[in-house]
Amino acid sequence: METIVQNPVQFTASAIQEICRLIEVGQGEGMMLRVGVKGGGCSGMTYVLEFDQKMEQDEVYHTESFPFIMNKAHGIYLTGMKVEWEGGLNSRGFTFQNPNASSTCGCGTSFAV
């Protein structure tokens, strides 16, 4: 019997479209989208959204359009998060809606738990 694991992170249609565009540009052999966190930023932790090689501690998840990797330990900070792409003139880039964040900074890329 196959176990189905729900994605800890959801991507909006606009985010999926932009990520697929970046994948088409080419990211190198064996590179996958990494979703994660790292220490730093004005609120304590910063989101990671980059192309990287899969590491031993990573889990692989699949959207309908692409796979992504995430360190198992980052799930506590990211489960339930939604990633969106905003392509407007005033705000352009990926934004993060994280229900686990107790506070976020003005730029939207840093948070505290």
Image (cartoon, grey):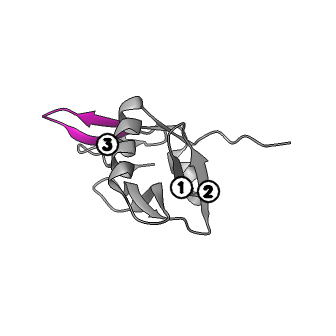
At 31% from the left and 48% from the top, the residue drawn is: 109
Residue for badge 3: 94
Q: CA distance from mark 3 to mark 2?
A: 22 Å
Counting residues from the N terminus, which is met first, the one under dot 1 or under dot 3?
1
At 34% from the left and 62% from the top, the residue drawn is: 40
Q: Position of residue 25 (x, y in %)?
A: 32, 53
Determine the secondary structure under disc 1: strand
Most common secondary structure along the magenta stretch: strand
Residues tagged 1 and 2 counted as in contact (Cβ below 8 A): yes
**Magenta-colored stretch includes residue 23:** no
**Magenta-colored stretch includes residue 94:** yes
Q: Nearer the viewer, residue 63 or 99?
A: 63
Q: In this picture, is 103 found above or below 36?
A: above
The quarter of the displayed image where residue 39 is located: bottom left
Give the magenta part as a residue range: 84-96
Any mark on residue 59, and which? 2
Q: Position of residue 77 (x, y in %)?
A: 51, 49
Please give the count of numbered marks on the rendered protein.
3
Q: Position of residue 92 (x, y in %)?
A: 21, 39
Residue for badge 1: 69
Q: Nearer the viewer, residue 80 or 49?
A: 49
Q: Amino acid at mark 3?
A: Phe
At 56% from the left and 68% from the top, the residue drawn is: 55
Any mark on residue 34, and which? none
The quarter of the displayed image where residue 46 is located: bottom left
93 with respect to 101 (left or right): left
Q: Position of residue 63 (x, y in %)?
A: 54, 40
At 61% from the left and 56% from the top, the residue drawn is: 59
Q: Amino acid at mark 2?
A: Glu
Q: Nearer the viewer, residue 108 or 16?
A: 16
Determine the secondary structure under disc 2: strand
